Amino acid sequence: MTQLTLPVPDAEARAHSERLVAVIGERIAAAGGWISFRDYMNAALYEPGLGYYSAGAAKFGEAGDFVTAPEISPLFSACLAGQLAEVLQACDGDSVLELGAGTGRMAADMLLEFERLQALPARYLILETSAELRARQAGPVAGVAAGSGGLAGAPAGDAAERCHSRQ
């Protein structure tokens, strides 16, 4: 079996990691020796200025840690939009909610495909807890369609119940 060799983080990355570890350690100590997994992951991912999705480092694409299908080609987004257009019509739906939209590329490509299919939803919402990513998503999405927007928390509504009740 081949041994996986990972790159050694530079001094700046190690210092950044140590600051985040210290913040999480302080929270654990202040909470009496333990915190929930949810609180741990929230700090690791979203702690202002330190968390993975809020520290400003490149995350997506060749300069980042990973690449997703929408960053490579609009094909995945077009296929998904075609299927969602059928579901929205069958469920009398008028909204799409995307969770954690990264750079916003998939949202922009899906909106273009919905438009091509003449099936634009009344609303395309993105639920994103990272303020940094919400700001990044605004560029690609704003250039495509009105009626789209971002949410920092879960929306209220009964779209799931409406679709489920028709089955």
Image (cartoon, rainbow, N blue to C red):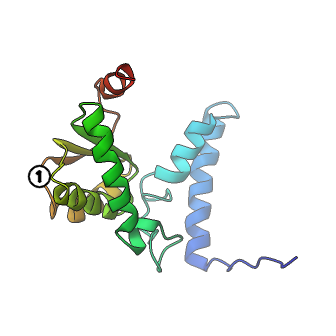
Quarter that holds the N terminus: bottom right
Does the image show residue 132?
Answer: no
Q: Secondary structure at mark 1?
A: loop
Q: Is residue 51 above or below residue 15?
A: above
**Percent from the top left, x then y, of residue 164?**
39, 24
| Identity of the residue drawn at 55% across and 76% down | 12
**Percent from the top left, x then y, of residue 74?**
34, 69
Q: Nearer the viewer, residue 92 or 148?
A: 92
**Percent from the top left, x then y, of residue 65?**
53, 71
| Identity of the residue drawn at 21% across and 61% down | 112
Q: Nearer the viewer, residue 159 or 152?
A: 159
Q: Is residue 89 above or below residue 5?
A: above
Quarter that holds the C terminus: top left
In this rendering, would 59 be left or right of 96? right
Q: Is residue 80 above or below residue 92?
A: below
Residue receiving disc 1: 146
**Percent from the top left, x then y, of residue 122?**
15, 41
Q: Nearer the viewer, residue 51 or 78?
A: 78
In this rendering, would 33 be left or right of 17? right
| Identity of the residue drawn at 23% across and 65% down | 140
